[in-house]
Image (tube, helix red, strand yellow):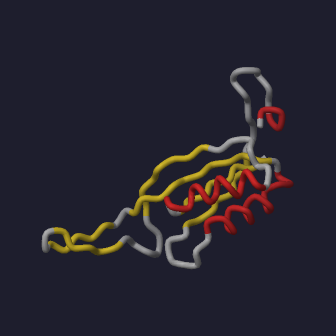
Amino acid sequence: MKKIEAIIRTEKLEDLKLALEEHDFTNGMTVSQVLGYGKQKGFTEYVRGQKVKTALLAKIKVELVCVDLDVDRLVSIIVEAVQTGEVGDGKIFVQPVERVMRIRTGEEDVDAL
């Protein structure tokens, strides 16, 4: 099993949810509001005539767990749904998952997904 973390633009969350539903990836996901920066390094704006550099940008982190065979397909769906081609589209991280347990039933691993 693999855990996929996607850091995306906030306005792309609904597009991603629709794409996942269209491709029957409805096992669940966790969504968090996060702050961060990459190569973009934030932006500069003016507030009441003062120059203010905002280093941390608001993003959304989406976490999903899937079986190994679905990883490439799921990553492709995420990219297709959220990519704008502009700086700041985000990143996707894929990590191994050793064990999953559904607390309510005690099911483990693939059965718990």
Q: Is residue 77 above or below residue 68?
A: below
Give the mark count.
Answer: 0
* Residue 82 placement (x, y as % from top left): 61, 66
Give the quadrant of residue 105.
Answer: top right
Position of residue 22 relative to residue 44, above or below, is above
- Residue 91 versus residue 77: which sits nearer the camera? 77
Q: Which residue is at a point 43% across and 66% down the rendered structure image?
A: 37
Residue positioned most to the left: 49
Direction right: furthest residue? 69
Report the residue at 73% width, 44% height from top. Answer: 97
Q: Residue 101, position in %: x, y?
A: 73, 30
Above or below for 29 versus 40: above
- 102 vs 55, left or right, is right
Query: Position of 84 compared to 72: left or right?
Result: left
- Which residue: 18% across, 69% down? 47
Where is residue 44? Give x, y as percent.
29, 75
Residue drawn at point x = 79 percent, y = 55 percent: 23
Using the rendered view, name the quadrant where residue 77 is placed: bottom right
Looking at the rendering, in which quadrant would you find the C terminus?
A: top right
Q: Position of residue 53 (x, y in %)?
A: 27, 71
